[in-house]
């Protein structure tokens, strides 16, 4: 799971703009945003750079249930 949708909303950026900057189709970026598919690590780093955030800001921390 990722937080790309939330970061785009926080920054007021459209998926179409991100798709153009990434050189990817709108449908591909929409798949990332809707969590239907996850970007490769290299793409995730590129998205973070474009959005001027840390990669960890794009990730959802999963609770492992360990204490």
Image: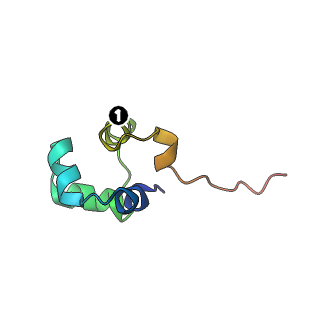
* Residue 19: % across, % down: 19, 51
* Residue 18: % across, % down: 23, 51
The 10 Å Cα crowd at callout 1, few under 14, some 14 to 19, many 20 or more, is few
Q: Is residue 21 left or right of residue 35?
A: left
Q: Is residue 31 left or right of residue 48?
A: left
Residue at 60% over, 52% down: 61
* Residue 12: % across, % down: 31, 60
| Quadrant of the image occupied by residue 60 | bottom right
- Report which residue position mark 1 lands on: 42
Q: How many marks?
A: 1
Is the residue 38 above or below the residue 12 in the image? above
* Residue 29: % across, % down: 25, 55
Is the image coloured rainbow, by chain, by secondary structure, or in one colour?
Answer: rainbow
| Quadrant of the image occupied by residue 44 | top left
Seen from the viewer's position, the closer of residues 66 and 49 is 49
Mark 1 lies on a secondary structure that is helix
Residue at 46% over, 39% down: 55
Residue at 18% over, 43% down: 21
Q: Is residue 35 left or right of residue 23?
A: right
Residue at 69% over, 56% down: 63
Residue at the farthest right position: 67
Is the residue 36 above or below the residue 40 in the image? below
């Amino acid at each position: 799971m990722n937080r790309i949708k939330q970061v785009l909303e926080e920054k007021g950026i459209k998926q179409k703009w991100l798709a153009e900057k990434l050189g990817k189709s709108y449908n591909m970026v929409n798949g990332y945003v809707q969590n239907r598919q996850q970007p490769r690590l290299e793409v995730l780093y590129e998205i973070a750079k474009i959005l001027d955030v840390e990669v960890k800001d794009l990730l959802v921390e999963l609770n492992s249930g360990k204490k």
